[in-house]
Amino acid sequence: MYTNIGRKIKGLAKAQAIIMAILCLGAGFFLGVAGVPVLILAGVVAALIFYIGSWVLYGFGQLIESAQRIEEKLNADNNHQTIYTAPQASNTYYNPQPAPSKAKPSVCPACNAPCHGNGRFCEKCGNMLY
Ligand SMILES: [Zn+2]
């Protein structure tokens, strides 16, 4: 019932556009002949609007259809190849370790001034120490 939904949406978009266009053109023509000629034009404009509006729904159906085709292709590929195997549970993938902390040098590597205090930058030249 819900298979091939992309193609169904496309069909719905087409059917809706055609039915609404016929209704608008018919009603406009009918009322126009009955004595309000401008409604013929209004009917044509309304039919055009329904036609253009159907592009959005049709495009959505096309999008679903394409995505399904890609999905099927990917699944078929996975059945023939063993490239995409699920990673084994092990510590090699996720091994959270703190970044290695560098020791603070005793003298500035840029200007050789002795480093006092806990600042990250040389007090003399401003060089980053670690
Ligand atoms: Zn320095």
Image (tube, rainbow, N blue to C red):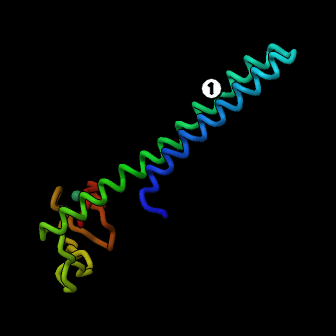
Element at badge 1?
helix
Which residue is rendered at x = 76% and y = 23% of the image? 28
Q: In which quarter of the image is ligand 1?
A: bottom left
Using residue 92 as the reference point, say whether residue 59 is left or right of it.
Answer: right
Using residue 47 as the reference point, say whether residue 84 is left or right of it.
Answer: left
Residue type at the position of mark 1: Leu
State whether label 1 is within 8 Å of ligand 1: no
Picture coordinates of residue 55 (x, y %)? 52, 36
Picture coordinates of residue 73 (x, y %)? 24, 57
Q: How crowded is mark 1: few (under 14 residues within 10 Å), some or many (20 or more)?
A: some
Picture coordinates of residue 125 (x, y %)? 26, 54
- How many numbered discs sit on the rendered protein? 1
Toward the viewer: 113 or 89?
Answer: 89
Toward the viewer: 37 or 34?
Answer: 34
Quadrant for residue 23, please give it. Answer: top right
Picture coordinates of residue 74 (x, y %)? 24, 60
Q: Vertical placement of 19 versus 86: above or below?
A: above
Which residue is rendered at x = 53% and y = 39% of the image? 14
Which residue is rendered at x = 73% and y = 17% of the image? 41
Q: Vertical placement of 51 versus 104: above or below?
A: above
Using residue 92 as the reference point, say whether residue 39 is left or right of it.
Answer: right
The residue at the far right in this view is 35
Q: In which quarter of the image is the C terminus?
A: bottom left
Quadrant for residue 50, please give it. Answer: top right
Toward the viewer: 56 or 36?
Answer: 36
Using residue 91 as the reference point, say whether residue 68 is left or right of it.
Answer: right
The residue at the far bottom in this view is 90
Q: Vertical placement of 42 versus 126: above or below?
A: above
Q: Mark 1 points at which residue?
A: 48
Quadrant for residue 44, please give it. Answer: top right
Which residue is rendered at x = 12% and y = 67% of the image? 81
